[in-house]
Image (tube, grey):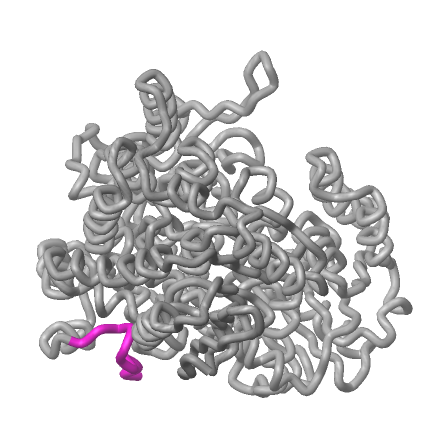
């Protein structure tokens, strides 16, 4: 054994072949600071082995290398940029040192080779992958660009245009796609991987493969003519500017780095990559996107834990109510492998539910993403029913009837009498108290909320709402079912609006107040979309939700929090509702909706809406004031939810907003946004508007957090 560490080893095999194996003590191989130290020792050991003739790089895990250890990033990235450049250079120097070993190198790639894992393969002369391989450079999804030589080596291996596409999208590519692009030298069945890689290495050692020439191409400038250079980079920059926009600097920084390095050798190009990576590491976007990745791991980790702890496995489900929501839930369950009964009281509703599911599937078939056979199997997993007879043996029921407490209470009591003693009953409600609904059922420990978001097939979030008598076993089973459906479940405690709607309605209230002071709703939408980054501004979002739905929810929130969310006099949303302007559902709300001559949807600011909501002269507000006026109430309410224990952690609070509302990912969620601004700065900004009402007044808990310099991501903030 030439070297044996905790993550890496180097062993001299027959015929002078050194096997350089990645086999970390954890479940996966990844690059962390400890692994880099061992990497340096392995390179030295290989260089000092006089018998070595070639190097075979392998993984002892079921997957090659998943990338760098992201958990180390946020703390390291707090360093000044001047310190980050030498830090990242140390990492890239290690890959360079391996690439410079005066022996042929072949890597056997199994499973995932992402980020630093992909960059490790690029430092090798030859790449052999098995058919399960998935390879790519996803750093852009973290607001970064490759930092261990990816921007230097990949363009020299597969061409600048292909490399830019790979890195700017962050996509992972299957083995055959990577082979076609020129990244891989061979693809074989998993059982033949080691044999094929050894054979290629033996050919290189014997001089049958010119590994030196192959390596040399990665050390020299790109082979592009002046015309090709202009065409390639100008085209790529134009496409990236249009798609990524100003809020995501990583793709443009990356392409400009490759462009500037095109005429340089490896050393010069690597220096530019080091500098570009360090610059991006200091951006708010990188901090937010890395934080989001880690928050997502928290949510997934809790769902995985619940799945292991669940004493009840959901093998058959039922949904009550076959409307668009019920049909969406039925589709999602059936598509992910859990058969489901869809019950309603009339055939027309069942037809709507089935057509909703069929419509989603047909679109996928038309786009080539789904086979007709799979579509048929999914539809066969949905059993339409007019009676409760088909619900025998179901493990969980999702009630999804009209959002009316009396109707829901009646249906819940009825269904409980038709299912088994151990069947879990849930309510898909967006606002009605779970404890209130629990009064209708006898087995309160087997009842909770399961709030899906519309459209169900696209929205990742499910709020699992725990009532005061809901058992841990019930919560675990429902979380596991939601995760099995491909959703990201977040457990919240019961309160008016639960979590998502509770924090959304102060935002809507702030919007109404702005309109009553003379703001133009189109100007507000533009600022919140273009400047803040929401997918749609508040007026457009209200139209999509439904003005009638929003008005109803406002009443619920007002009853729940009368001092903070009381009904607004002359509320523009209520005015639109009273004038039958219900939003997209009837084609008229803040905007008028229709179709152009080609059948494409149109959205035009409605003159009638201006007439309905006009109360004062129109007034211009600055971008900063619009953002502050709308976001302070939302952030304040998120903080209150954390302090009251409605949601457990800042990570879950942020992911809920990302997955449930489309909060701008580059801002990382409300708490990440708050901490990026700085608690002291946010409090000073909020205090300027405190006279406008309670929704603008920060909590004593936030002031205490600011005074002590604490972070919501590392502190238990429950105060109630």
Residue at the spot 33% in from the left edge and 30% down from the top edge: 241
The answer to if 146 sits in the magenta stretch is no
Residue 501 visible somewhere in the drawing: no
Query: Where does the magenta region start and end?
Result: 710-720
Residue at the spot 81% in from the left edge and 77% down from the top edge: 419
| Quadrant that contains the C terminus | bottom left
Residue at the spot 61% in from the left edge and 86% down from the top edge: 309
Q: Position of residue 136 (x, y in %)?
A: 48, 50
406 vs 101, left or right, is right
In the rendered view, would you say 177 is above or below 619?
A: below
Q: Position of residue 441 (x, y in %)?
A: 68, 80
Q: Position of residue 310 (x, y in %)?
A: 64, 84
* Quarter assignment of residue 321: bottom right
The answer to if 716 sits in the magenta stretch is yes
Residue 680 visible somewhere in the drawing: yes
Q: Position of residue 638 (x, y in %)?
A: 32, 65
């Amino acid at each position: 054994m030439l070297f044996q560490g905790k993550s890496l080893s180097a062993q001299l095999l027959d015929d002078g072949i050194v096997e350089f194996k990645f086999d970390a003590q954890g479940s996966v191989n990844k690059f962390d600071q400890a692994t880099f130290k061992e990497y340096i020792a392995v390179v030295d050991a290989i260089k000092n082995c006089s018998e070595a003739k070639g190097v075979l790089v392998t993984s002892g895990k079921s997957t090659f290398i998943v990338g760098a250890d992201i958990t180390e990033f946020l703390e390291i990235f707090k360093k000044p940029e001047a310190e980050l450049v030498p830090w990242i250079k140390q990492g890239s120097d290690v890959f360079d040192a391996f690439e410079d070993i005066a022996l042929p190198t072949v890597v056997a790639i199994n499973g995932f080779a992402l980020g630093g894992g992909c960059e490790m393969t690029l430092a090798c002369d030859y790449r052999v992958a098995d058919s399960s391989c998935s390879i790519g450079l996803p750093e852009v999804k973290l607001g970064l660009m490759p930092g261990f030589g990816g921007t230097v080596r990949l363009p020299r291996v597969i061409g600048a245009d292909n490399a830019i596409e790979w890195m700017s999208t962050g996509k992972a590519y299957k083995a055959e796609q990577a082979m076609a692009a020129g990244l891989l030298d061979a693809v074989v069945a998993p059982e033949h991987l080691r044999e094929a890689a050894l054979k290629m290495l033996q050919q290189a050692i014997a001089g049958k493969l010119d590994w030196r020439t192959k390596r040399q191409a990665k050390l020299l400038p790109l082979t592009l003519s002046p015309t090709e250079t202009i065409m390639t980079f100008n085209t790529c920059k134009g496409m990236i500017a249009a798609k990524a926009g100003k809020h995501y600097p990583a793709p443009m920084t990356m392409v400009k780095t490759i462009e500037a390095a095109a005429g340089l050798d490896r050393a010069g190009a690597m220096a530019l990559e080091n500098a570009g990576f360090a610059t991006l590491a200091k951006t708010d976007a990188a901090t937010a996107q890395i934080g989001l990745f880690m928050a997502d791991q928290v949510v997934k980790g809790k769902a995985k834990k619940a799945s292991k702890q669940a004493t009840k496995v959901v093998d058959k489900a039922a949904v009550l109510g076959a409307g668009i929501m019920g049909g969406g839930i039925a589709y999602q369950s059936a598509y992910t492998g859990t058969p489901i009964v869809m019950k309603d009281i009339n055939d027309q509703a069942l037809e709507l539910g089935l057509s909703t599911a069929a419509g989603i599937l047909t679109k996928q078939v038309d786009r080539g993403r789904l086979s007709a056979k799979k579509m048929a199997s999914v539809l066969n997993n949905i059993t339409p029913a007019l009676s409760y007879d088909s619900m025998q043996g179901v493990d969980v029921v999702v009630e999804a009837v009209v959002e009316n407490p009396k109707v829901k209470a009646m249906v819940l009591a009825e269904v409980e009498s038709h299912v088994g003693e151990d069947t879990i009953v849930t309510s898909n409600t967006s606002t009605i108290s779970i404890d209130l609904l629990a009064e209708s059922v006898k087995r309160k420990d087997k009842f909770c909320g399961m709030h899906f978001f519309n459209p169900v097939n696209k929205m990742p979030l499910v709020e699992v709402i725990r009532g005061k008598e809901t058992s841990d076993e019930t919560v675990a089973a429902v979380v596991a079912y939601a995760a099995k459906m491909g959703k990201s479940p977040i457990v919240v405690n019961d309160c008016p609006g639960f979590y998502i709607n509770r924090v959304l309605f102060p935002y809507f209230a702030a919007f109404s107040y702005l309109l009553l002071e003379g703001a133009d709703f189109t100007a507000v939408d533009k600022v919140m979309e273009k400047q803040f980054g929401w997918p749609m501004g508040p007026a457009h979002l209200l139209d999509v939700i439904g003005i009638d739905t929003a008005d109803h929810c406002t009443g619920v929130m007002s009853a729940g929090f009368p001092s903070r969310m009381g009904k607004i006099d002359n509320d523009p949303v209520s005015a639109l509702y009273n004038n039958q302007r219900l939003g997209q559902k009837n084609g008229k709300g803040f905007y008028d909706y229709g179709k152009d001559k080609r059948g494409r949807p149109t959205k035009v600011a409605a003159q009638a809406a201006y007439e309905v909501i006009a109360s004062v002269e129109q007034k211009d507000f600055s971008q900063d004031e619009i953002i502050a006026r709308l976001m302070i109430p939302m952030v304040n309410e998120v903080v209150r939810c954390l302090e009251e224990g409605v949601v457990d952690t800042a990570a879950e609070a942020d992911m809920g907003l990302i997955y449930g509302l489309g909060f701008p990912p580059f801002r990382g969620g409300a708490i990440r946004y708050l901490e990026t601004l700085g608690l002291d700065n946010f409090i000073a900004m909020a205090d300027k508007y405190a006279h406008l009402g309670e929704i603008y007044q920060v909590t004593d808990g936030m002031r205490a957090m600011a005074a002590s310099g604490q972070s919501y991501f590392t502190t238990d903030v429950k105060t109630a």
